[in-house]
Image: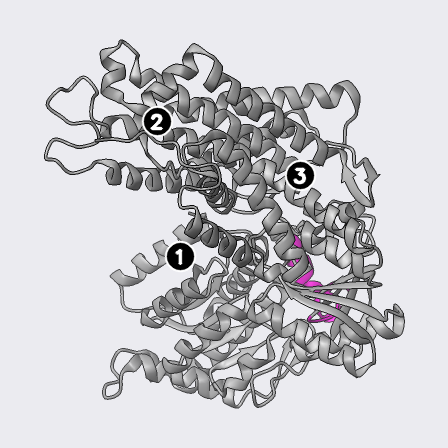
Amino acid sequence: MSPWPLFCQQLVNGLTIGAIYALIAVGYTMVYGVIQLINFAHGEVFMVGAYLALTVCLLVGASHALTGIALVALCLVMAVVAMAGCGLLGWGIERVAYRPLRPRPDNCLTPVGASRDGHTPRLTALITAIGVSFFLQNAVMLVYGATDRRFPALVPPLRWEVGGATVTVLQVVIVATGTVLMIAVQGLVMGTKLGTAMRATAQDHKACWLLGIPVDRIIVITFILGSVLAAIGGILFGLYYNTINFHDGYLTGLKAFTAAVLGGIGNIPGAMVGGVVLGVLEGLGAGYLSSQWKNVFAFVVLVGLLLFKPTGLLGERVAERA
Amino acid sequence: MSPWLLFAGALVIAGCGRDDRVIKIGFVAPLTGDQAPHGEDMRNGAKLAVEHANVQGELLGGYRLALVELDDQRNPTQAVVAAKRLVADRDVLAVVGHLNSSCTMPASAIYHQARLLQISPVSSNPQISRQGFDTFYRTCATDDLQGPAAALFAVRELGATRIFIIDDVTTYGRGLANELEKKLRELGAEVLGHEGITQGEKDFMPLLTKIKSLEPDLVYFAGMFPEGALLIKQRLDAGVGGSFMGGDGLFDPVLIDLATPEAAEGVILTTIGSDIHQVPTAQAFVNAYEERFGQVGAYSAYSYEATTIAIWAIQQALQNNRNLFSRTSGGVSPVTERRQAVLDVMDEFAGHPGLFGVQRFDEKGDSLIRDIGLFTVQDGRFVFLKTASWE
C-alpha cells in the first residue's frame, strides 16, 4: 500500500469514529450551554442506548447480517426504542438528579448560579453527575451481566475501493447519519422557536423566566435531545464494533467530552468539528506513530491547541455573566 | 451475590459460633469485567475441587473446607487489596489465584510476606517464579516455552517470514510477545513491527490499516480474548491478509462468539497445557465438571488442579501435627505457624497424581508438566491440532 491510499484509509477510519464522538459530544455541549454543567452521566446514556438496541436484537432474534426491508425495519425499531429509552432516561436524570440542585429562576433572592449561602451549586451538580454515572454503570452491569456482549453484525459487510482506500457500507452509514443529524440539530437550534428559547436560556435563566420562557422545560428538552443523539451514537457504536460492555460509556464519553472541549464547549458545530478532528487525530497517531501512543498523541495535540486557542477550535459559546 | 458465596458466608458465620472447625482456601480471579468468563471457569474448577474434598469429609479430620472467592477485576490494585484481605483472614491457609500475571506478580509478594501458600493456576509470565518466593507454585507451563513454541510453529509449519506482533502491554502480554520475538529473530524471520494496544480499547482499525500496508503473512497477538476478538473481527474489515495467531489468553469460546465464527476461522492458538479432552487421566474430572457446570473452560482444569494440591497440602500438614490446628499452641502466632506447616509440606512435595499426569514442581515452583497445546478454530469451534515443541 503506497503512502497516499494509506493516509486516505486512516482518514476514513478516523472520520467514522469521529462521527460517533460528534454525536455524543453534542449532548455534552448542549447541556453545558444551557446550565453550565458537565453531565458526566452522558457517556452512560450512550452506553444504555447501545444496550437497548441489543435488547431489541435479542428479542427479535436477529443475530446475523440482514438485507433489504428487514434490515431497515429492524434498524428503525432499534432507533425508536433506543431513542425513546434514552430520551426518557435523560428526562429522568435531569428531573431526579439535577433539577432539585438548581436554584429556581423565579427565586428573586437568589442570584443566578449561586445557592442561598452564596456558594456555587455547580460543583454539587457535577458530583451528582458522577454519582449518576456510577449508578447507571452498575445498574446495567446487574441487568446485562459484567462481561462483553456480542452485538450482532446486522449490516452486510459490503465494501468499495475509493482512491485506494476501502470504505464499508457501515462506515458510510455512520458518517451519513452523523452528518444528517448534526445538520438537523443545528437547524433546530438556529431556526426554530424552541431553538431560540434554548439559546436564550443559555444566556440568562432569569431574564428568560421574566419573558415567559418555561426555563425548566427548555432545560429538560435539551437533556432529551442530547440523550436521543447519544442513543443513535450507541446503536452505531454497537453495529461498528460488535461488542458492548457496561464500561464502554466511560472511555467513549470521555473522548466525546474532549471533542466538545476541542471544538469549543457550548458550541454545536464545534462539537461536530471536535469529534471528527479527535477521531482523525487518533487514527493518524495510531497509524503513523504507534497504537500505544494514540491517546497520548491525540491529547498532546489537544493541549497544544488549547494553549493557543483556549476557547476551542470554533470558540466557546457561553453567555457572559456579570 | 452468588449462592455459593452466601453459602461460604454462612459457613463462616456458623464457624464463628463454634470453635474453628473451618479451614479456608482463598480464590482470586476476575469475576466481573470483560475477563469474567475466564474467571468463572476458574472458579468452577476450584469449587469442584472443594466439593470433592468435602464429600470425602474425614480427610480433613472433621474440618470443613470453605472457598473464599474474591474478585480482582483483572486490576493489579484490586489484586493487592484481595491479597491483603486473604492474608488478614486467620482461617485462610492457601490461595488459588490469580488469573493475570499482572495481578499475580504484586499479590505474590504479599502472600510471601505472610508465609501463605499461593498456587496460581494459569499466570504464565516466567518472571513471577524468578522472584525467589518459596510460597509460589503454578500448575501451568510458562511463556518462555509458549512464546518459542508459537514462533517455531509459525516459521517451520506455517512458513511465515514476515510477522507483525501486537501485545496488550500487560505483564502477560508483553512478556509473551517478547519471548516470541526473541525466538522469531533467532529463527531468521522478519519482525515487521511490535506494538502495544490498551486493554478496554475498541478501535484497532488504525493499527490494522498500518499492518495491512506492511503486508505481513502472520499477525500475532499476545493478550486476552476481549481485545483479541476485536482484532480478529476488525482484521477482516481492514482486509489484513495472512494467518492470525495468539496465546492462551485467547482460548475461550467467547472469543469466537465476539469475533464471529467467519472472522475467527483458521485462527491458531497456543495453550499452556495439552487438550484436557485428550488426556486419559483427566476424564473423571471432565465428566464430573460437565455434569455440574457444563463445558469445561480453558482454565477450569488448572484451577481444579491447583485447588486439589492446596487441599492435599493442608491435609498433610494436619496429619503431621494435629496440635498445630488447635487453639492451644502458644508462643509464635498460630496463624503463621499453620501457614508455615502447609509450606513445609509443599517443600517436600514429591509429586501428586494430577489431571495431566503426575504433577511435580521445580525449585522455582513451576510445574514440570510443560506441554504446549496447539489449537485452531474450525467451524466456530476450537479444534486441537497437536502438542507443540519449543526447541
Q: Quadrant of residue B61?
A: bottom left
Taking the magenta stretch, the answer to whether it contains residue B277 is yes
User: Depth check: A289 or B240 in front?
Assistant: A289
- The region drawn magenta spans B272-290
Q: Is residue A183 above or below residue A145?
A: above
| Residue drawn at x 79%, y 21% as measured from the top left | A68
For the residue marked with disc 3, what is the amino acid?
Answer: Tyr
User: Depth check: A147 or B343 in front?
Assistant: A147
Q: Please state the horizontal and vertical placement of residue B293, each as a whole percent of the image.
A: 61, 51
For the residue marked with disc 2, what is the amino acid?
Answer: Val
Q: Residues within 10 Å of mark 1 (few under 14, many from 20)?
A: some
Please give left or right for residue B246 compared with residue A142 in the image: right
| Residue drawn at x 41%, y 26% as measured from the top left | A90
Q: Which of the two marks, 2 or 1, is nearer to us in this view?
A: 2
Residue bearing mark 2: A34
Labels 1, 3: one chain = no
Mark 2–mark 1 distance (CA, rounded to whole Å) = 52 Å
Q: Which of the two marks, 3 or 2, is nearer to us in this view?
A: 2
> Considering the numbered disc 3 on the image, is that residue within a helix, a strand or a loop?
helix
**Residue A240: assigned label:** 3
Residue bearing mark 1: B8
Q: Residues within 10 Å of mark 3 (few under 14, many from 20)?
A: many
Q: Quadrant of residue A319?
A: top left
> Considering the numbered disc 2 on the image, is that residue within a helix, a strand or a loop?
helix
Q: Is residue A212 above or below residue A50?
A: above
Labels 2, 1: one chain = no
